Amino acid sequence: RGLGDVYKRQVLTLLEGKSVGETASLIRGPVGTDLILHVKNPNLSSVARVRLTRAPIELSGVRDSNYQRFIKKPMPMLSLYSLEGSEAVQVSDYLGEIVVLDFWASWCATCYQPVTKLQALYAKHPEWKGRVELIPVTIDSDYERARRVIKRQGWDKTRHRAVKTEDFHQIGLSVIPLVIVISPGGTIASMSGAHAIDVEAEVEALLGN
């Protein structure tokens, strides 16, 4: 209400052709933030009102994780697979470096913004090279679909990995978007929903800056 015609046209152009999931990624603010959409079919006089609320996404059949029980504990063994083939590395292979794991999925539009932020951090902090690994990790089983999202979003600064959903569950994780910051010694320094954690501040604190 009260928006000028020019701004209205900009908003309509922004949302035109987008799915509800893609529209959800435009929600800004902490968990609990609402976005109210008034959806009008040009062939009908009625208007549908849709409320979208930012919240962590729970994977089917499992409950939200209790993040606190992971803090200051060793990072569980976890295989990270290449999106180009079967090559896999272990999280423990990065021992001695700070590791940031950002778990996302192609179908989780609210996961996109945190991964985009990692690209900006990579560009902003060249001094982190060799000391910090920023790794977006998809839980998609369809690697081709994940690669398409990565290309479309322009996430070309970070090395992307994938994790098997059953492995994700097995170590006690269940909710995305999720970020885990691992200290050089291999313990979990911080862990939270990706929208509720300041990755830059967490990394700088571990670096002693």
Image: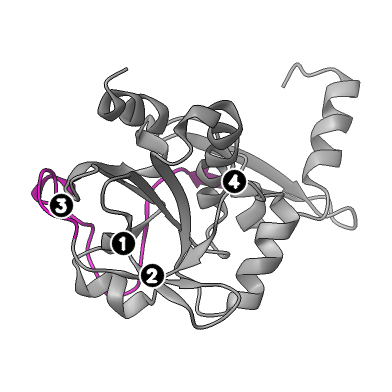
The residue mark sitting in front, 2 or 3, is: 2
Can see residue 189? yes
Which residue is labeled 2 in the image? 89
**What type is the residue that disc 1 sits on?**
Asp
Q: Secondary structure at mark 3?
A: loop
Task: Please name the amino acid that badge 2 sits on.
Answer: Val
Disc 1 target residue: 93
Q: Which mark is residue 10?
A: none
**Element assignment for label 1:** helix
> Cα distance, mark 4 to mark 3?
25 Å
Q: Secondary structure at mark 4?
A: loop
Sequence-earlier tag: 2 or 3: 3
Q: Amino acid at mark 3?
A: Asn
Quick one: label 4 or label 3, which is nearer the N terminus? 4
Magenta extent: 51-75
Residue 66: image tag:
3
Mark 4–mark 1 Cα distance, whole angstroms, equals 33 Å
Q: In terms of sequence position, does the residue under pointer 4 or pointer 1 come before the other?
A: 4
Whole-percent x, y for residue 117 in the image: 55, 37
> Where residue 124 sits: x, y (%)?
57, 26
Q: Are marks 2 and 1 in contact (CB under 8 Å)?
A: yes
- Look at the numbered discs 4 and 1 and tell me whether their residues touch, using CB distance below 8 Å: no
Relative image position of residue 126 (x, y in whole percent): 55, 30
